[in-house]
Amino acid sequence: MEAIKRFRVVLSEKQVPGRGLRKSPDLLITHIVPSLILSIPFIIQLDQTGRRTMVIYPLSTVKVWLSYAESQCWIQGPYYHPPDQPVPSIFDKSYDSQRLTYMAYLPYIFSGAALILYSTYFFCSLLMRPFATRFEAVYSGCDMIVHSKDENVLQKVKDRITRVLLELQADRMHIIYFSIARFGYILSLFVVGAYFSYIFKTNYFVLGFRSAFFMVGDNALKVNERFPLKGYCSVTFRELANGQPKNTYILPALMPSNLMLSKLVGFVWILLYVVSFPLALTDTIYTMSYFLSKGRGFNSKSLMMFLLKDSVTPSVYEAVKAALNMKVVEIYQMKHALADSQE
């Protein structure tokens, strides 16, 4: 229940500073999905019933080196070897593409993916901080409109809000930053895919799809090539007792953690490209169409009104809109009167 309450706090706009700048798709991409990605190594560790890499060694000469063999295999990374091919006597550089180097670095790998998703919001929040401060001022004024019944106070509040909005009318910098951030959130999803492709040495966009739908066709076999349950390790020992400084053995290894990892990779793919991407794309199209529609203008005042519309009740929004229109008419009449007096 406590986790559900915290989840609601994150999604609740009223609990987030600069709440207007963090819409639901933004929170999903920059906070919720990264948090789920960060939890993957812990889920794997909880699911793991044995060691991370359990070496099967039929050689009696290395039984005393059990812990050392497993640690060396885990750190260096075991090799994937097709089960229908003979095991070579030694793995040379030509087998490096089949080495599973990610085994020991899963916490760092998924932390990097979470950092990529969060960094877009971080840099955007730095650029948008002056605008966020003004939005908070306007939002607090709207809150006073709801709770105050003094007409003098209400008029002063509306004057302050309209003054802020009119100051933003000539500003385009922040709406440009906001628009870039919208596309940046979408781009970060594909940067994560490219990052996983580099780490796992395969096309993650295809691998994730196969992992998500592992029950279809030969997808399970293809995923097993990158996350096999069985592989081989090249382990080197110093056996001075036998008169030799070093001996290298090719030992089979079981990797039970890959059973859970192969499924979680598909889960992340679904989060990124089935849930987050459509929501972010739809929200971006809707947002940009609002800004570019006739009569609104591409400026920071339009951005403020757009965010305000999603953050306050319709009655308060209409009151602010009416006060702004009256102020614009008043300014126009003053300019027109001034021009007539000069003539």
Image (spheres, rainbow, N blue to C red):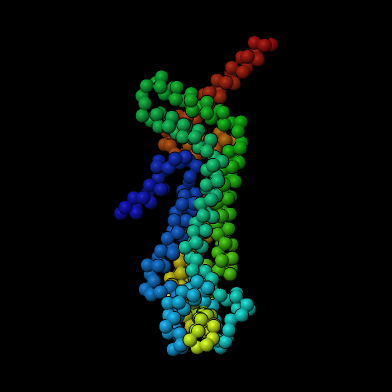
Apparent side of residue 67 relative to residue 237 in the rendered image (left or right): left
Q: Quadrant of the C terminus?
A: top right
Do we see residue 139 in this rendering?
yes
For residue 324, above or below residue 246: above
The residue that appears at 46% across and 78% down in the rendered structure is 69
**Nearest the eye: 237 or 319:** 237
Q: In the figure, residue 60 lies in which quadrant?
A: bottom left
Residue in the foreground of this view, choosing between 179 and 124: 124
Q: Is residue 289 visible?
A: no
Front-most of 120 and 304? 120
Farthest residue to the right: give it.
343
Residue at image coords 48%, 37%: 308
Q: In the rendered view, tell whether residue 112 sits above or below residue 206.
A: above
Q: Position of residue 126 (x, y in %)?
A: 54, 42
Residue in the image at 36% along x and 26% along y: 148
Give percent across and percent down for residue 6: 36, 50
Name the foreground residue: 306 vs 39. Answer: 39
